[in-house]
Image (cartoon, grey):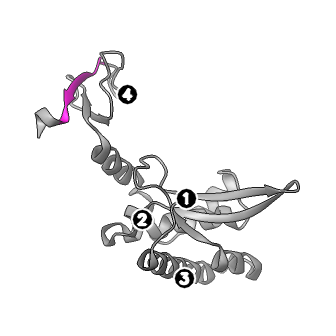
Amino acid sequence: MVRPNASQSLRLELLRDEVVTEMKSLGVFSVESLNIASTVNLGLLRKNSTQRHGVTRWIREQGELILQTVDLHPVLLEQDWSRYAAFVIYHELLHAIGNRSHNRDFRSMESLWPDVGASKQGLEFTNKMRLQRASWLWICPQCAMEYPRQRPSGGKYQCRKCRCRLIDRALKDIK
């Protein structure tokens, strides 16, 4: 966990308040759940995280799980990602109020989020984060799919789409 600065903390709290207000309007969450969601500590993930967009952290004390914090990727605090950030906070708050696994009940509650388009931005966000950290592109010669990576593939990997062997290109050569 990274400690947010004052402006990041304010942005996280405003975002949480917006999401909790939306959760109230859905009418399916108990007062106790909304109180937990309103008061959970907020933090940030490391900026070099490419796979995680948000995380709910728990600690075990005397055999009991205690909610510690909800962390969000710092890039999600940028204005361009505000819709997706609200969805990620909503997702993590569902975990925070006790829905720890991604089961059918969790997914049905997650689907209540009104901004359907926001939930679809996850892949775009992951690709942006990977591309920022990547030094190599693994390129499929057949379908032109590109996979940004930090290391060359050495010809060991296949395209997920068409199963053709991937070719390495250094990003410095492409730019």
Q: Which of the two marks, 1 or 2, is nearer to us in this view?
A: 1
**Stretch in magenta:** 164-171
Q: Earlier in the sequence, mark 2 or mark 3?
A: 3
Residue at the extreme right of the image, as rendered: 62
Residue at disc 1, secondary structure = loop
Please give left or right for residue 164 compared with residue 88 in the image. Answer: left
Q: Is residue 132 above or below residue 144?
A: below
Q: Which of the two marks, 4 or 1, is nearer to us in this view?
A: 1
Amino acid type for the residue under numbered disc 3: Asp
Cα separation between marks 2 and 3: 15 Å
Mark carried by residue 17: 3
Answer with the quarter of the image where residue 75 lies: bottom left
Q: Which residue is mark 4?
A: 160
- Residue at the spot x=49%, y=72% of the render? 114
Please give left or right for residue 98 compared with residue 18 in the image. Answer: right
Q: Is residue 117 visible?
A: no
Cα separation between marks 3 and 1: 21 Å
- Residue at the spot x=46%, y=46% of the render? 51
Q: Considering the image in quadrants, where does the N terminus appear?
A: bottom right
Q: Which residue is mark 2?
A: 84
Please give left or right for residue 27 compared with residue 52 in the image. Answer: right
127 or 67: which is nearer to us? Answer: 67
Q: Earlier in the sequence, mark 4 or mark 3?
A: 3
